[in-house]
Image: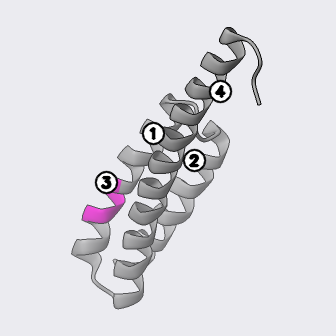
């Protein structure tokens, strides 16, 4: 348990950040799953729409420091390749 006032404040701030980061991470993962579900269903139009939303969420999590930019780039690349494979 934190003993000083500054340590208590730091603990409160860390908890708020942890919850915010978990929420962002969860919504990003859900967006990526939506793309994967559309790809598995073979629905190219839905996959393309979900891909745009997923890329936007990935970029947002990178901007907020929740995810590393290379990890997000890798995910965007994999999702894009999956969606492009549908249209061939």
CA separation, marks 4 and 3? Answer: 33 Å
How many residues crowd around disc 1 within 10 Å: few (fewer than 14), some, or many (20 or more)? some
Which of the labelled discs sits on residue 53, or is there none? 3
Answer with left or right where residue 58 lies relative to residue 18.
left
Helix or strand or loop: what does disc 1 sit on? helix
How many residues crowd around disc 3 within 10 Å: few (fewer than 14), some, or many (20 or more)? some
- 52, above or below 82, in the image: above
Viewer-proximal residue among 33 and 73: 33
| Magenta segment | 49-53
CA separation, marks 4 and 1? Answer: 28 Å
The answer to which image quadrant residue 75 occupies is bottom right
Whichever of callouts 2 and 1 sits on the residue coming sooner in the sequence is 1
CA separation, marks 2 and 3? Answer: 13 Å
CA separation, marks 2 and 1? Answer: 7 Å
- Tell me, yes or no, whether the two marked residues, 2 and 1, touch with CB atoms within 8 Å: yes
Q: Which residue is mark 1?
A: 59
């Amino acid at each position: 348990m934190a003993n000083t006032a500054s340590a208590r404040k730091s603990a409160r701030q860390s908890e708020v950040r942890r919850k915010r980061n978990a929420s962002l991470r969860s919504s990003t993962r859900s967006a990526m799953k939506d793309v994967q579900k559309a790809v598995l269903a073979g629905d190219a139009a839905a996959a393309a729409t979900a891909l745009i939303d997923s890329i936007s969420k990935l970029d947002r999590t990178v901007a907020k420091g929740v995810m590393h930019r290379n990890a997000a780039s890798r995910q965007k690349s994999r999702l894009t390749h999956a969606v492009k494979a549908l249209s061939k």
